Amino acid sequence: MLDNTSSPTASRPSALPKLPKAPSGIEGLDEITEGGLPLGRPTLICGSAGCGKTLMGIEFLVRGIQDYNEPGVLMTFEESAAELAANVTSLGFDLPQLQAEKKLRIDQVHVDRSEIEETGEYDLEGLFIRLGHAIDSIGAKRVVLDTIEALFSGFPNEGVLRSEIRRLFRWLKDKGVTTVITAERGEGTLTRQGLEEYVSDCVILLDNRVIDQITTRRLRIVKYRGSTHGTNEYPYLIMESGISVLPVTSLQLNHEVSDTIVSSGIPALDEMFGRRGFYKGSSVLITGTAGTAKTTLAATFAAEICRTHGRCLFLAFEESPQQLVRNMQSVSINLAPYLENGQLLIEATRPTLNGLERHLVSIHKLIREFRPDAVVIDPISNLISVGNLSEVKSMLIRLIDFLKVNNITALFTSLISGRNIQQEMTEEGVSSLVDTWISVRDLEGIGERNRGISILKSRGMSHSNKVREFLVTEQGIHLLDVVIGPGGIVTGAGRLTQQLQEQAQLMAAQQELERKDRELERRRRVLEATIGNLRTEFESVEEELRQINHEEMARQQALTEGKAQFTQPLPLQRPNESQQN
Amino acid sequence: MDEEYWELRLYVAGQTPKSVTALANLKKYCEQYLKGRYALEVIDLLKDPQLAEGDQILAIPTLVRKVPEPIRKIIGDLSNEERVLVGLDIRPRGSKGPQ
């Protein structure tokens, strides 16, 4: 307390010893306080009724005993030891057992003004002696005073009381015990009696707020002398296992990434991704309007994870496990065997069952216990019914971070309301958080609806830009080949019509071709026939010509011969010659 | 009923001035009003700290009237005689109360 303020040379952190801290053992609190409560000093926990101040004190003691082997003393001013023990039994804290083991000592201080008469001077040495005795008898390292303000109603002399309380805290510090003092919150002040004046090392404020009929408990560290700490308001829960504080933004974006690819369970869908699937440990969001087979896609993925010997946690916010298994059976996704062999865990809860924080914590708990390779949440949009937008978003951020840090592939489905296909902003605004975003939608044409699937984004790999039509058949989900019509990609009946038309066109073209072939053949034959005729004609003409030629030649010859006869003396009479011509 | 027996216990913590004063005052009142009808036990919590819990002792010094019932506690050095008598429900001999 003295050192911190008077050390301007804090630039050498390694040389200076850090403030020693006592880990509280309360989930999340040690993370925010960067190690725990100040060791050997008092810490004030204040808050209004029903915040869990006493519980936090008791948990601090019990965890100290169980996890850090530090015995503790609980001095209660309000409830009896038996009452306290009964109150925390449900959290699994067995106070009587710890008392029997001499690890815990509960001292109930009962102050009843009606039976106390005050005459003259006094001090509270009795309280010191009792506390000192309790601490020494078990060697306690931790002390909880719950709620010391009750003394103010028992002793009329406030002046004495205040100086004694101041002396008490000083004394506890000297004794070196880590003390938690609980106090009721006052009007405009942290505590009703201004205890924060005396306890100045660490003050934790608990708050119980009701917004929209939903209670959220929040914790804030008001001050922590000599130490840095988280300054935000952190939601915390009182659960079956005690208090759990959730640091909203303490996780950093520095998790390990995996290069392994996880299949979506649908080969054709995988083919739309450049690396044929999702990266392991990435988060996938499937958005779509009602009835676009989001759950079926999710179940296909879950079944694929199980088929490849992974473990999958399926958080169903809409259907019971039995219903889910039955419904998926109808599309040949058989989840039952994986349920039986423990690879698949379907956890079905109504979102309204718990507040958001509790959902988150129970999911954390399930994940830690089940150690899945993939988590499916169907759907996240239902969570909106238990929280407002920013709360749901902050919860999902934390969940996604948690899953990423643990390298768990996450698949969320989300219902988009409204008819507008362009509406690609999810209500939760988680789209910027997820790595892969698949959109399923209704492609409503003339008189029918078809389902289309497209990839809006996929970090770290290329992806198809096409809207593919898919069918939910008895054999599961089938992506159909892309059919491009005159107006772009066609689906459903349009697709069929298009296909029929194309077929008809093809046939017509074929027939036309055949007809043309035949025509050509015919014409060839006609021409050939004509050619034959002409040739015959030509031959006869030729024949005739030859005949004429021949006759002409014969005539010429006869003529020549006749002329010769005229010019030459008459030959000797050869009776045969004249007879031949 | 007049001859009630008084069992008193005075819790002190060492020989502090307040404790010494308280014991002296108490002895004086007892001798004066309860002579022969009382038993006084002085408990030093420094020696027997475990006894503090039983009678719910916080303040020092504390005088506890164990008998007659109900238990009464008077804290302080008992310097105010009247208040001690009222607190212990002791009536001076002279007075004649209805009880």
Image: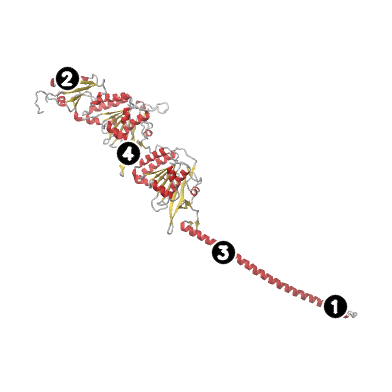
Image coordinates of residue A559 in percent, x first then y, are 83, 78
Q: Chain of mark 4?
A: A
Q: Chain of mark 3?
A: A
Query: Do marks 1 and 3 share a subunit?
Result: yes
Q: Amino acid at mark 3?
A: Gln
Of badges 3 and 4, nearer the viewer stands 3
Of badges 1 and 4, nearer the viewer stands 4
- Which residue is disc 1 drawn over? A561
Q: Amino acid at mark 1?
A: Glu
Q: Residues within 10 Å of mark 2 (few under 14, many from 20)?
A: few
Q: Is residue A218 left or right of residue A537?
A: left
> Is tag 1's residue or tag 3's residue first in the polypeptide sequence?
3
Q: Amino acid at mark 2?
A: Lys
In this rendered view, identify the residue nearer to me: A50 or A457: A50
- Which residue is disc 2 drawn over? B27
Residue A152: image quadrant is top left
Q: Which mark is residue A487?
A: none
Q: Amino acid at mark 4?
A: Arg
Query: Do marks 2 and 4 share a subunit?
Result: no
- Which residue is disc 3 drawn over? A511
In what element is the residue under mark 4?
A: strand
Q: Chain of mark 1?
A: A
Q: Residues within 10 Å of mark 1 (few under 14, many from 20)?
A: few
Query: Do marks 2 and 1 share a subunit?
Result: no
